[in-house]
Image (tube, rainbow, N blue to C red):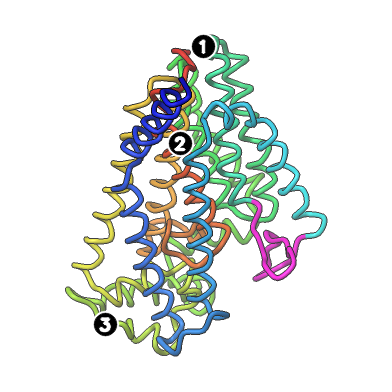
Amino acid sequence: MNAIVTTLRGHERRANLRHFDWALVATALVLCLFGLVAIWSADGAGPLRLSGPVGRQAIAMLLGFLLMLALSRVDPRYIRALAWALYGFALAGLIAVDLIGVTIGGARRWIDVGPITIQPSEPAKVAVLVALAAFVADRGPEMRRFLNFLLAGLLVLVPMVLVYQQPDLGTAGCFAAIWLTVMLVSPVRRLHLAAVLAASPFLALFAWHFVLHDYMRERLLVSFDPERDYFGEGFNIIQAQIAIGTGGLFGNGLAGSLQSQLGLLRVRHTDFIFAHAMGMVGFVGGVALVAAYVLLLWRTSRVALLVNDLFGRALATGVTGLLFFQAFVHMAMNVGLLPVTGVPLPFVSLGGSAIWTQFAALGLLQSLLTHRRRTAFGRD
């Protein structure tokens, strides 16, 4: 009997391994390797040091990869059961930023934890997504009630406001993207969702006059007219556009554009890494980069089609929406189509908290895949 149980368990592990999406992992790792090269180039392509940006990012990527593997082994039922604890920890982290956070570049978004600095708003994205997916799955058809629709919005609005106050408009937008994508696959009444979308222009007008900080309004105006503040807010937008344009068809090589070499393109490790990368690899390389993101999003959205429960479907769709929003907004703000909001390019931009969060999101998707035959949520 023990031999039979052992055999079944061994078969179960093999079955789980077969369901593991290696193409998804490979795509993420390719983006990570490209990110390391881009960060090394942005840092001057000098000698590699463990304490330098490339070394720190490589360590963060390794830890993120291990985190993904660990989460892939966790049954989604446990993740769903811990949803509210994760949500509570996320809110505590965001509140802690106001109390003990450190200010960098005029914004208080980080907390010093020993030798490292973490940005609580990054893991909060995944925590809020898990809580929202659990809320929707627990309510099931009851999501058609307006009260539950309202509560789902409040669930996301609370951390969104805390992040906005840091201030961090870009990450606040990520929470809005999470809410919208999860609502699209939940059993909410389309009338409620359509009403929110129809009211969006009026809400935007209200936010312009009564919510946005002065610098945010100025940044929006400058984004569409960089010459309005050529040597101020518009300077980096103009330099980014020049860097992208001078990349030509095949780019300028590892040295990047002249804007990067002369230090004219600022924050090219993070907010403007796409512009720096386009200066490196040109139009052809940029198309390949976009293709890699299309492949990544295809594999994440595929998970939503394979799982047979509402929690898994909402979680997978939310991860897909979050990654799409970040990639699109980052590229759009680099070319001047959207205001500069500091949204990192997934798996490419420098930042340990961001890379851990992105790998954690993939780990949750792998968990859904590797446990989908054994999970017994039932249809919600």
Q: Which residue is mark 3?
A: 253
Residue 261 vs 332, above or below: the answer is below
Give the camera-side residue of 260 and 198.
260
Q: Say few, some or many: other residues with alpha carbon within 10 Å of mark 3 (under 14 / 14 to 19 / 20 or more).
A: some
Judged left or right of residue 240, residue 204 is right
From which residue to which does the magenta span run? 101-120
Q: What residue is at 56 percent from the left and 10 percent from the top?
A: 145
Asked if the residue at tag 1 contacts the one at tag 3, i.e. Cβ–Cβ closer than 8 Å, the answer is: no
Q: What residue is at 62 percent from the left and 26 percent from the top?
A: 81
- Which of the two marks, 3 or 1, is nearer to us in this view? 3
Decide whether the magenta segment is chiefly helix, strand or loop. Answer: strand
Q: Say few, some or many: other residues with alpha carbon within 10 Å of mark 1 (under 14 / 14 to 19 / 20 or more).
A: some
Q: Which residue is mark 1?
A: 144
Residue 31 vs 57, above or below: the answer is above
Please state which amino acid type lies under the numbered disc 3. Gly
First of labels 3, 1 by sequence position:
1
User: Tag on residue 367?
Assistant: 2
Q: What residue is at 50 percent from the left and 54 percent from the top?
A: 66
First of labels 2, 3 by sequence position:
3
Q: How many tags in the picture? A: 3
Asked if the residue at tag 3 contacts the one at tag 2, i.e. Cβ–Cβ closer than 8 Å, the answer is: no
Please state which amino acid type lies under the numbered disc 2. Ser
Where is residue 181? Give x, y as percent: 44, 32
Judged left or right of residue 75, residue 25 is left
